[in-house]
Amino acid sequence: MDQLPDDVATLKRLVIERDALARLTAQELETSRAQLRTEREELHTERLLVQKLKLQIARLKRMQFGRSSERHDERIAQLELIVEELESNLPPQDETHKSDPPPSDKTKPARKPLPDHLPRETQEHAPACGCPHCGTALKRLGEDVCEHLEYIPEHFKVIRTVRPKMSCPKCSAVVQAQAPSRPIPKSIAGAGLLAHVAVSKYLDHLPLYRQSEIYARQGIDLERSTMAGWIGAISELVAPLVDEVGRYVVAGTKIHADDTPVPVLDPGRGTTKTARLWTYVRDDRPAGSTDPPAAWYRYTPTREGSHPRAHLAKFEGILQADGFSGFNGLYESGQIREAGCWAHARRKFYELFEANRSPVAKEALDRIQAAYAIEEGIRGKLPAERLAVRQRDAVPLLAGLQSWMRTTLATVSAKSELAAAINYSLKRWEALTRYSQDGSIEIDNNTAERALKGPVLGRKNWLFAGSHDGGERAAAMYSLLETAKLNGIDPEAYLRRVLQRIADLPVNRISELLPWNLTDEQAPEPMRLAA
């Protein structure tokens, strides 16, 4: 709502403005009025646009979720709270009331042992040295051992680097050891702290201002601006390593590619514009390869096809991607061959089935699912074996699917969503079925889509930076952290080791810091995943 003048200063300002207007000539007054009318019209137009956009947002939300879906979600949330309250009143699951009869061996749940990799602290509770009955010294007979899980919050520590000055009694020379290098010169942050801040921001989705609040509760004063400077310094420091990841990815024979929109603040207009974050993933493990996987991320201010062409200028092989037209220019020279994504084709039929339970869409889903079932049995096999199975089982199935689609297309309206879904597959049939002719290709592009899940979840925490630098920093950090995850390595431990060594490592040896090239004594601890 417009605010009314409520103080003397505002009234004085209005009087001064009135007097100034009175001194204007008639022509100046008319010009000012015309300008004021124009500004009011523009303001009115902007308010109408805001109302229109809000209405569109409300309609889109109803289309996406629906009123019944909202009630359903609310009901689930209420039930979750009820269950939580009820469970809070019950004893822990692994405790049994003494008066209850012991369950049989067949029904007693087996509690999983606590992970071996966790550090352990032994607390011994021994009885008095003498027998409580006669006072005789006791001898150890045996012991009962039980374990319980405890949580110790993460803590900071200060590293004092002491460099004594030594003098020679004979020649009076003064000798002192060289100061160890730091990831960021003259910074108070060690490699471990830098790695923790970066991983918290990009993988754990904790913005820097929230991290600052968390550290403040531990008595550590770290301003958001200070940590933002660290992030910028880290991205510059690891830039050669990120380039090395890119060279490794492009050197492969098959790449999975995808992109996702990222809104970036336009400082001049105070609004956002849409940029893109691209991912290029080399991962041939499903085809039995022992080559380590890697994910390379690139940021661009637009989604023009010139960007992927620049990223993959030196690549030769199979590019597995969705049907984005910006990739089309990559296939013109024949240097790169296209492989389609059945997950995208299937998704269109799935949306139709979810919307109206279309039996035709269900038929398409069942046929596509049969193709996926074939892949389940050959995942991880060598390309030759995969190709033989696909030639025997998948090729006839795909031929039948194509014939069914063509027949069905002739029976439905050309303007229907079902026709659009069928045409999407038929127009890309050669790319969609290329996997059946090459055992190294996958049936879909889910490898790249999985690589974008983390950035999609966390992008609200690093966007709106006011420039494109934030997107480029995010692309650099995701390249290292997601590559570490693909190789089963704790990303924070990996980044810590990288930051400990990279400042002293020549550029021509930067490949030593790739996750799979770290020696045993340099490698970070492996990432343990829950079973």
Image (cartoon, rainbow, N blue to C red):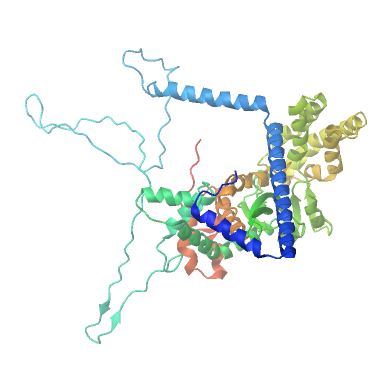
User: Compared to 520, does 178 lie above or below?
Assistant: below
User: Compared to 473, does 508 lie above or below?
Assistant: below
* Closer to the camera in the image, 502 or 68: 68
Residue 474 appears at what percent x and percent y?
58, 55
Residue occupying image coordinates x 49% and y 53%: 8
Residue 524 appears at what percent x and percent y?
46, 53
Question: Would you say 336 lies left or right of 479 here?
Answer: right
Q: Where's the N terminus, which quadrant? A: top right
The mark total stands at 0
Residue positioned most to the left: 134
User: Compared to 433, does 270 lie above or below?
Assistant: below
Asked where in the image residue 137 lies, by quadrant, the reply is: top left
Residue occupying image coordinates x 72% and y 39%: 56
Residue positioned most to the bottom: 171
Q: Is residue 314 visible?
A: no
* Closer to the camera in the image, 206 or 347: 206
Q: Is residue 131 visible?
A: yes
* Closer to the camera in the image, 400 or 363: 363
Residue 184 appears at what percent x and percent y?
46, 66
Residue 46 appears at what percent x and percent y?
70, 49
User: Compared to 297, does 126 lie above or below?
Assistant: above
* Closer to the camera in the image, 320 or 293: 320
Question: Would you say 261 lies left or right of 484 here?
Answer: right
Residue occupying image coordinates x 8% and y 24%: 133
Question: Would you say 74 lies left or right of 68 here?
Answer: left
